[in-house]
Amino acid sequence: MVPNISSLSSYILEYQRSCANPTGYWAYVADTFYWRRKYDEVLRWDFEKPEIAWYVNGKLNITENIFERQIYYRRKQVALYWEPNDPGQPARSLTYQELFEATQQFANVLIAQGVRKGDRVAIYMPMVPELVVAMLACARIGAVHSVIFAGFSAQSLAERINDAGARVLITADGGYRGEKTIPIKAIADEAMESTECVERAIVLRRTGESVPMKAGRDYWWHDLKKNAPLVHEAVEVDAEDPLYILYTSGSTGKPKGLVHTTAGYMVYTAHTFRNVFQYEEGDVYFCSADIGWVTGHSYLVYGPLLNGATNVMFEGVPTWPDAGRYWQIIDKYRVNQFYTAPTAIRALMALGMEWLNGKDLGSLKVLGTVGEPINEEAWHWYHDHIGKNKCPIVDTWWQTETGGIMISPLAGIIPTKPSYATLPFVGIQPAIVDDNGNELTGNSVEGNLAIKFPWPGMARTIWGDHERFRHTYFGRFANLYFTGDGVKRDEDGYYRILGRVDDVINVSGHRLGTAEIENAINEHPLVVESAVVAFPHPVKGQGIYAFAICNEFSTGGEAGIRQSVVKTVERIIGPFARPDKVLVVSGLPKTRSGKIMRRILRKIALGEGDDFGDTTTLLDPAVVDEIVTKARAMEAEAG
Ligand code: WT7
């Protein structure tokens, strides 16, 4: 098992050791895993190129580290408790042995479909155990999975499938989310209309609704499984062979396929999981994230399973059939560690205390949050009412790009402070830099958050676009990885994440680029141009405010346009990217050089006064008054 840091003094010692001798430290952690061939060198790196390689020439398979390494003593232990969307439906559970067999069998299915090491497999599935099986089966044969969140539209799905060049798509007939049934296969079918690379679709039966199956392309999961053997010997891969691609948003339009490789990601997710959550043998751990995002990859699938943890996986949503759903699950499975997003906490907090009645939360030991800053009010509610004042909260800061948790308390070890991610994980060397890249040393400073030294879990490239990887993350400040976040280090040396400093916004913990939303809005036939800014939203953290120039109105006038703009974004990106407010305007505040002055739009979105500072560089200052007047009218109309 990975080493455990079990006291504040050993954290301080290990932190110093890991920074003074990173390769020694990460070799020490890596040596607790099973290697087919040991690495020759711990780390090779150059942030200029950039080139990062951990455990050079090591050979392994991550599923061998999940299964073979632990199976003799975990055969009968539950790996996955699966709780369905509808509490009236039967729950399922899979032991390590059952998950192992399902993985091997599905690996054989993939092999029979011609999938080989290095091939990309797209996965577009609801939150069911077969999603985990599909990922692990890819890893078993050395294929690269690319999971696409099932809330994405057909167009977004197609774009990602094409970018990854996936040969196989694993999907389902449909999925359940709260009271809704999602027509997953229909969306996948539409996506496959505009993909040339997909040769096969493997379709899991979940809802049982009848769906068209295209002859020669679509096959049922259960049919393919029938003749597949239960034994599959893991394919040996290189430490730096890609494990998966996961798409995320950046400040420009096109989504980025971040590539995570095998060994470093394995070591890092396992080590952070064990230590941040202080997971102990026999504990039951529940991460409410969807596997479509990195949190699900690292802290529902790989990190916990590599530690032999017992996981709870939930198909549904926190507010259905009622707002007590999470608390009921925690009670039912006697959950010890619970990891969720601030947006869920704020939503549940707003629905009142009655949903806690009759729920025994006494099993909880650790609470976690991820994805966005947590405000103090939500922090206290979580701490007092869910943790009953006895559970430390780990506010974990990290990113799709970092692969695992970077700045966070270790539960019960590093003292917490509301809305602070506190201190860096062992081996993580943060730097706060000003806009010119000068490091701001000492305490009580604020600036851009960068990282000085590689860590094993970091992404290695953007699929098919290494130059974009270079300039996005290593081009901003010399010899530093740039996170895109602003940060403050307080008088105690504690870190507080202030939010993005680029054009990325965070809506309910979902990361979206303003350019991506604008591109979607511009697809609307009547929209000439648009600009999107974020505004503070009580539940979502940030909401989306869109300003759109339209040169004519269809029937339904402005209200009709607003609605159809929202529909357009749902269709092009997905329902989770829906703008909260759409204001139809006749112009946007632009400088003479044609640049939109977003700070003015942000102020308007905030409903803030009339002082917009220096507007003399604007081409047409009068446009600001018009927008303000219209924005006020829209607020008044909304009440
Ligand atoms: C962005 C990364 C990490 C998994 C889920 C999101 C924001 C993340 C925190 C936190 C404040 C946070 C940052 C970051 N963020 N965790 N604890 N406190 N902000 O991954 O979709 O790649 O988004 O989420 O702005 O850059 P992601």
Image (cartoon, rainbow, N blue to C red):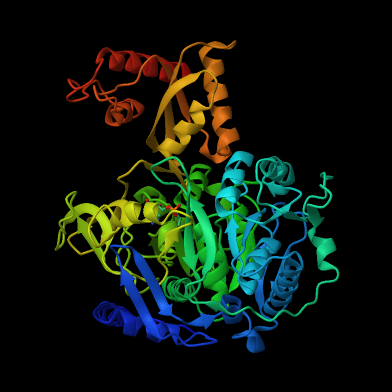
Residue 26 lies left or right of residue 200; in this view the side is left
**Could you say which is closer to the camera, residue 43 or residue 377?**
43
- Residue 485 x %, y %: 31, 51
In this view of the protein, which residue sits in the foreground, 310 or 452?
452
Residue at 15%, 58% in the rendered image: 440
Q: Nearer the viewer, residue 219 or 567?
A: 219
- Asked whether residue 547 appears in the rendered view, the answer is no
- Image position of 223 with respect to 584: above or below: below
Q: Say which quarter of the image contains residue 220.
A: bottom right
Q: Is residue 268 above or below residue 480?
A: below
The quadrant where residue 135 appears: bottom right
> Which image quadrant: the C terminus?
top left
Q: Is residue 65 left or right of residue 91?
A: left
Residue at 59% over, 86% down: 69
Residue 379 at least partly seen = yes
Q: Is residue 488 above or below residue 573?
A: below
Picture quadrant where residue 396 is located = bottom left
